[in-house]
Amino acid sequence: MIAAWIAQKAIETGNFNVEVLDLGEINLPMMNEPHHPLMKKYEYEHTKQWSAKIEEAEAFIFVTAEYDYNYPAPLRNAIEYLASEWAYKAAGIVSYGGVSAGTRAANSLKADLVTMSIVPISQGVNFPMFAQFINDKEQFAPNEVSHKAAEAMLRELVRWTKGLKVVKENK
């Protein structure tokens, strides 16, 4: 629900070609490549496909829940599968959870993204007590504050994506 909402917001800007990568559907096994990701000597088809998807992307929006004060293990696994494919790209974060709105997960994710040379932008979208945003028709219905936060994040994501193109050219 939340991923579909932010994807639609990104499409509406006219600045992004959007593809939602659902880790539940992709279903990467726990890291099983025999070589370090920096070598890009991938042996398994699932890694080659994942690498191609991430390589072609110019920016990311990570949508994450908070689980035990952190982001979920499948997301960390998906990030650690690769190395250079992530580098010099900007990322926004949309988090959700209980009273903390997933902000602890978002902060932990930001720290890990930096180690992959991803630039996490400071603007984000956070949903506290996220069930309150699901209406009686079981549809996601964010409030005006959430819409404004998403618009600000997307503007910054465009700005950083344009700037990082120069950095990527010189790597």
Image (cartoon, rainbow, N blue to C red):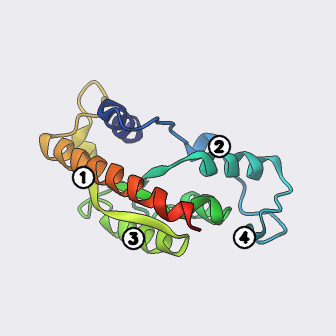
Structural distance between the alpha carbons of marks 3 and 2? 24 Å
With 18 as the anchor, is 27 left or right in this view?
right
Q: Residue at x 55, y 42 (%)?
A: 21
Q: Which residue is mark 3?
A: 69
Q: Which residue is mark 2?
A: 26
Residue sitting at the far left: 144
Q: Are marks 3 and 2 in contact (CB under 8 Å)?
A: no
Secondary element type, mark 1: loop
Check the image and report above or below for 77 versus 158.
Answer: below
Looking at the picture, which amino acid does disc 1 mark? Answer: Met
Q: Residues within 10 Å of mark 4 (few under 14, many from 20)?
A: few
- The residue lying toward the viewer, choosing from 156 and 134, is 156
Looking at the picture, which amino acid does disc 2 mark? Answer: Ile
**In the picture, residue 78 is in which quadrant?**
bottom right
Q: Are marks 3 and 4 in contact (CB under 8 Å)?
A: no
From the image, state whether disc 3 or disc 2 is nearer to you. 2
Residue 68 in view here: no
Q: Quadrant of the C terminus?
A: bottom right
Q: Residue at x 39, y 66 (%)?
A: 105
Q: Earlier in the sequence, mark 3 or mark 2?
A: 2
Q: Which residue is mark 4?
A: 38
With 55 as the anchor, is 143 left or right in this view?
left
Q: Which residue is mark 1?
A: 129
